[in-house]
Amino acid sequence: MTSVVITGASSGIGEKMAFETANRGWTPIMLARSYDKLMKSADQIKKDTGVSPYIFQLDVTDQQGIETTFAEIIETIGPIDVLINNAGFAVFELAHESSMEIAKSMFQVNVFGAVACTKAVLPKMMERNSGHIIFIASQAGKLATPKSSIYSATKHALLGYANSLRMELGGTGIQVSTVNPGPIRTPFFDTADETGQYRKNVERFMLDPEIVAARTIDLIKRPKRELNLPKWMGIGTKIYQLFPGVVERIAGSQLSKK
């Protein structure tokens, strides 16, 4: 049975991906800081799907905790088939107003947490020549916008890491995918956008978390290098990469929604 480890699984798309994993008859292994929230989510998943998820309390900024938790998972449950690096957060602020404490925290969670979790699963995956690592990145990692300088930088770093890792693992049988969603209708914005202004401005563009979760879990059976959601936004970022000055000049006001 396919085992799927999901970080940041107590809410948002992490929780939805755990539901989707169970719906397909696979085994969700849910990791997050809040054990109470994990228990509540796991109980609901079992009630709705009949599948009992495994839950582990983990702060992805705790290096020793990561090593201990993943070792326990492998020892008690078995090989990890899929790792979904989903844990992450944002605080939207002007660059000169953002604190170094928050900036460092975003990098610790969004980047170094994913790197540490990946390192924890790679040795066993490489022994088996099998596995799949999925990084939940963001369109913000391709097209930075005002008030998201640090968040965009973390997602840009995550994409760079994933792309390099994919090439390193070529021929090993281990798949590496990145998922780059636009804004999703989740509690993510409770922290990222305390004013509610950004949420209000992009409400009509927000993705349904269930759709993002389903499309992401689809990658397990149909791996691909990159998944951009929505598709039109992915096309937009490609145009930006080709003509950044033109896009910033023409669409500048549309990029300043925060």
Image (cartoon, grey):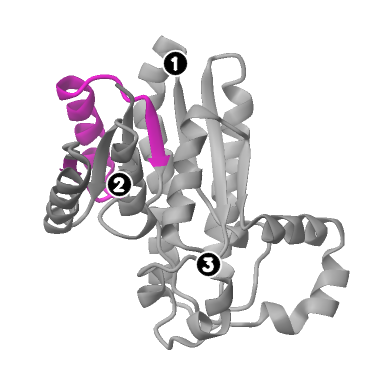
Pinpoint residue 15: horizontal percent, then vertical percent: 30, 52
Pinpoint residue 140: horizontal percent, then vertical percent: 60, 62
Q: Secondary structure at mark 2?
A: helix
Amino acid type, residue under disc 1 in the picture: Met
Residue that appears at 49% across and 28% down = 221
Q: Any magenta on residue 65?
A: yes
Q: Any magenta on residue 77?
A: yes
Amino acid type, residue under disc 3 in the picture: Pro
Q: Quadrant of the N terminus?
A: top left
Nearest the eye: 81 or 221: 221
Horizontally, residue 225 falls left or right of residue 62, namely right
Is mark 2 in CB contact (under 8 Å) with mark 3? no
- Magenta residue span: 55-84
Residue that appears at 35% across and 44% down = 20
Nearest the eye: 101 or 119: 119
Q: Residues within 10 Å of mark 1 (few under 14, many from 20)?
A: some
Q: Which residue is mark 1?
A: 126
User: Which image quarter: residue 160?
Assistant: top right
Work out whether mark 3 precedes mark 1 in sequence or the reverse, and give the earlier one. 1
Residue that appears at 53% across and 67% down = 183
Q: Which residue is mark 2?
A: 19
Pinpoint residue 92: horizontal percent, then vertical percent: 49, 76
Q: Which residue is mark 3?
A: 183
Q: Secondary structure at mark 1?
A: helix
* Residue 218 visible in the current orientation: yes
Select label 1 or label 2 by which is in front.
2
